[in-house]
């Protein structure tokens, strides 16, 4: 039976709509933008609540410092710009003005990863989450779809302290439910489980244990799901896990889903250094207490290289080893 393709929905529009929804019930929310409101879609908040919207111009450092001041005065300050500028140009302000005092600043790094496929190295942020992850006290969210974006914005509003959220520029498949709340730090199973079902040549279903766990984040959740579907048709059980909180990463959650698996693969749209793969590996081999040998491990991530311009997002993902086929091959190779 052919599987229905998930619906594609804009994460940027979801972010703007979520800001408007939260702003309706919380008058303390203010939004600051660095001349990219029509791209990040914070312009929706401007249209709804112009008195609480501040256009700061191309001045990311000033925007972040101003947001910290508003937060220390009791506001919930959301800032918006491209991820490469949010994490790069305003690093010192994030560190000193938001993270050190624990200010209630929510930073939107839009057009993250390679998703700004047409603008090349200067606008593609292959390292932003890894940079922010190194700052003590920061929480980092990386949604897999539009539904998760909306739930995350609610969670960010309720959370006390600085948060960084990555927003993909492109429309992505929807895998998470629209209902329910988002819990920061939780790992969400998306597909598969401790067992899976394979239809044999006689048309009968045979249950088999999951051999591998794929810890994926952001756009790579959809690629992991494609790979898992192919693997399960071949009799390889796979559990796909959506790691949409990059920090804090709960060790007990990682070990729970890795238990009993022969292989663990991580998939992320970031450079390997300082990313999700290294964090998962540190938990597996630093905190794990496996009965026998620990699971074999592999990373699907961007090598030590910047992006480049391309005709499409999909072309870049394939070029940089982030396609569904790359996830498939990593699982196959890791299983030996």
Image (spheres, rainbow, N blue to C red):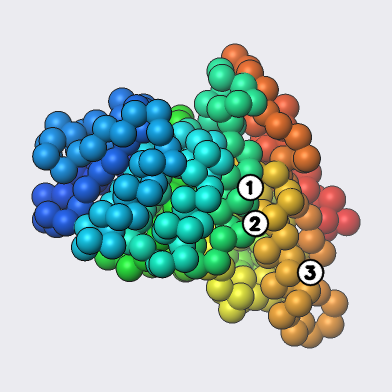
Distance from the alpha carbon under mark 1 to that under mark 3: 19 Å
N-terminal of the pair, mark 1 or mark 3, is 1
Residue at 20% x, 39% y: name it.
53
Badge number at residue 276:
2
Q: Viewer-nearest of labels 1 and 3?
A: 1
Residue at 40% x, 28% y: name it.
58
**Residue 232 left/right relative to 335:** left
Badge number at residue 295:
3
Q: Is residue 217 visible?
A: no
Q: Is residue 138 visible?
A: yes
Pointer 1: what residue?
268
**Residue 283 point in image, percent of width and height:** 69, 72
Residue at 20% x, 52% y: name it.
29
Label 3's element? loop
**Residue 230 left/right relative to 64:** right
N-terminal of the pair, mark 3 or mark 2, is 2
Quadrant in which the C terminus is drawn: bottom right
């Amino acid at each position: 039976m052919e599987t229905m393709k998930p619906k594609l929905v804009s994460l940027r529009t979801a972010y703007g709509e979520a800001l408007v929804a939260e702003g309706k019930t919380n008058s303390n929310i203010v939004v600051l933008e660095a001349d990219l409101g029509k791209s990040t879609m914070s312009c929706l908040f401007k249209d709804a609540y112009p008195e609480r919207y501040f256009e700061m111009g191309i001045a990311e450092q000033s925007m972040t410092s101003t947001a910290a001041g508003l937060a220390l005065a009791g506001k919930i300050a959301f800032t918006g710009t491209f991820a490469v500028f949010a994490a790069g140009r305003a690093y010192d302000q994030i560190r000193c003005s938001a993270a050190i005092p624990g200010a209630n600043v929510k930073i939107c790094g839009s057009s993250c990863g390679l998703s700004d496929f047409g603008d090349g190295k200067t606008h593609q942020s292959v390292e932003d989450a890894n940079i922010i992850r190194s700052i003590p006290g920061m929480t980092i969210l990386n949604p897999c779809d539009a539904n998760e974006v909306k739930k995350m914005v609610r969670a960010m509003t309720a959370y006390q302290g600085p948060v960084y959220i990555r927003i993909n520029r492109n429309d992505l498949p929807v895998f998470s439910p629209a209902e329910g709340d988002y819990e920061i730090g939780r790992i969400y199973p998306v597909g598969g489980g401790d067992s899976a079902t394979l239809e044999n040549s006689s048309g009968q279903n045979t249950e088999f244990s999951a051999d591998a766990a794929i810890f994926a984040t952001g756009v790579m959740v959809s690629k992991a799901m494609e790979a898992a579907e192919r693997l399960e048709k071949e009799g390889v059980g796979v559990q796909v896990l959506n790691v949409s909180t990059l920090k804090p990463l709960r060790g007990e959650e990682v070990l729970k889903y890795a238990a009993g698996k022969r292989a663990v693969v991580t998939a992320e749209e970031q450079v390997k250094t300082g990313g999700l793969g290294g964090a998962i590996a540190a938990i597996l081999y630093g905190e794990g207490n496996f009965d026998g040998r620990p699971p074999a491990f592999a990373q699907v991530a961007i090598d030590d290289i910047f992006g480049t311009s391309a005709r499409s997002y999909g072309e870049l993902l394939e070029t940089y080893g982030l396609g569904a086929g790359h996830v498939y091959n990593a699982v196959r190779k890791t299983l030996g």
